[in-house]
Image: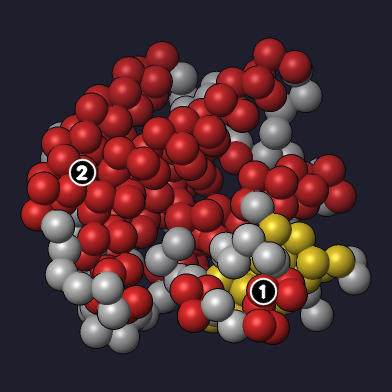
Amino acid sequence: MNRLFHVPLSPFCRKVRLSLAEKRIEVELVEERYWEQDPDFLRRNPAAKVPVLKMDGKMMAESAAICEYIEEKYPQPALMPKDADARFEVRRLVSWFDDKFHHEVTSKLLYERVNKKVMGQGYPDSANVKAGARAIKYHLDYMTWLLDHRRWLAGDSMTLADFAAAAHLSALDYISDVDWNRSEVVKDWYAKIKSRPAFRSILADQIPGFPPPQHYADLDF
């Protein structure tokens, strides 16, 4: 059995979960309190980060590398286009969300509101929360611009770029930090991707002490 060591609200773990589910690859989910630096987990990934995927007799770390491995090993249904220019655009947008969006938004909102409490690191920094709330508006506007010109974020087909974006936004939506009224086109995009069978396990996540809002699992939100 494939096994994914993960944290439910980690967007990096969610991106891998979506890729696996879209390709109908069964995986056992194992929650990992990576911040506790458990020796067994450090042997799986000395970087002490999630996700870690056990597959094909290997332990694999780093979400981008894991997703590309899954894509190459299980190419159908495709989450990367064949054209080199189109593949570049997918990789650019995955990096945008996993780097820029994560630094400016996810780490300022999700990590402050949830991770600090779970890890016993104190109370949210209000300055960080305010900065994240400002920054997400810019990112939603950028997504609006992309979707005004394309069916999906990177082009005419759904790709790993959409899963990267949805992974971050779904985690933030769990704590009601996405203003879906800001952009009808982004809301429609999220409704499409949220309705996919691959999203079901993510919508079923329950974090002790942090109940999701009523709209979180609602496909007609």
For label 2, the residue is 132
Q: In this view, does 84 lie above or below 60?
A: above
Name the mark on residue 42. 1
Relative side of 48 to 1, left or right = left
Q: Can residue 25 be seen in this view?
A: no
Name the mark on residue 1. none
The quarter holding residue 158 reads: top right
What amino acid type should be assigned to the residue bearing mark 2?
Gly
Q: What residue occupies the far right of the structure in this picture?
A: 57
Identify which residue is drawn at 15% across, 70% down: 123
Select label 1 or label 2 by which is in front. Answer: 1
Q: Is residue 154 above or below residue 203?
A: above
Identify which residue is drawn at 39% across, 20% down: 146
Q: Which of 90 and 101 is in front in this view?
A: 101
Can you give x and y, in whole percent of width and height, for residue 210 in the image? 24, 78
Secondary structure found at label 1: helix
Labels 1 & 2 near each other (Cβ < 8 A): no
Can you give x and y, in whole percent of width and height, for residue 143 in the image? 34, 28
